[in-house]
Amino acid sequence: MSNRHRLVHVVDDDEGVRRSLDFLLSHAGYEVRRWDCAEAFLRGAEKMVPACALIDIRMPGMDGLALQKEMKAQGFNFPIIILSGHGDISMAVQAMQAGAVDFLQKPAERESVLGAVRSALETITDCEEQRNRADWAITQLGRLTTREQEVLDGLACGYPNKTIAYDLGISARTVEVYRANVMDKLGVNSFADALRIAFAAGLGSERRWLETHTLIAHQRQSE
């Protein structure tokens, strides 16, 4: 886990819980911000600073589920750990279904809290690595012409050369030439490596292909 990702927001109306979690997490090396209600958190937390949030599911005013929804709406892309009482399991499950990464029952054991926070913060690193790979893959596609990208997109959809040729209005032999050019320009030795770059860059959506290229082909055919 990156040393940058050590910030934990604790959102709970119980001062004793806030202090206890602050003590535990601070001594484990985390930076902690404490908030006594959802509204204070939304006003004061910096959404662009990577962090995770420990959120009590039952709070006066805006509860944990409502806060989770509002965080999404306002662009707080934090992994969320829900703190629930014994009778709040169904609400905790709802929070998980809405995207929370974990939930802890109060009073939570030390190792459970630390393990949940560690896992939550690791998801930030995983997402950043995925974004970095996507950015790299998109840069690689910049080496290709528009037509070469279209051919690679079709191949990533799993279509045979004949289908791609028909939809793009070119010959199957021309598709083979483009495919060879793609592998050469991307500097890959196997078709699987080319596909990995294509998928990382967001190519390979059959729905998008059907909405665009086949429509173009049918229009050409009807002209």
Image: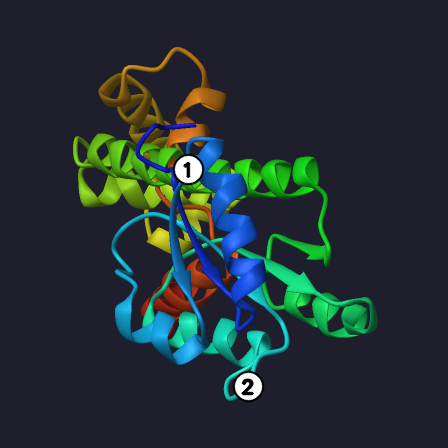
Tell me the kind of residue under disc 1: Tyr
> In the image, is residue 77 above or below residue 175?
below
The 10 Å Cα crowd at callout 2, few under 14, some 14 to 19, many 20 or more, is: few
Residue placed under numbered mark 1 in the picture: 30
Residue drawn where x is 70% and y is 65% of the image: 84
Q: Position of residue 191 (x, y in %)?
A: 46, 21
Q: Nearer the viewer, residue 112 or 36?
A: 36
Q: Position of residue 196 (x, y in %)?
A: 45, 29
Residue drawn where x is 77% and y is 72% of the image: 88
Q: Give the CA distance from mark 1 to mark 2.
A: 27 Å
Residue farthest to the bottom, as pictured: 61
Q: Nearer the viewer, residue 56 or 5?
A: 56
Residue drawn where x is 33% and y is 67% of the image: 75
- State the quadrant of the C terminus: bottom left
Tell me the kind of residue under disc 2: Pro
> In the image, is residue 219 above or below residue 76?
below
**Residue 190 picture quarter:** top left
For marks 1 and 2, the one nearer the N-term is 1
Q: Secondary structure at mark 1?
A: loop
Residue placed under numbered mark 2 in the picture: 60
Q: Nearer the viewer, residue 115 or 143?
A: 115
Q: Secondary structure at mark 2?
A: loop
Q: How is the image coloured?
A: rainbow
- State the quadrant of the N terminus: top left
Q: Position of residue 20 (x, y in %)?
A: 56, 51
Q: Is residue 157 visible?
A: yes
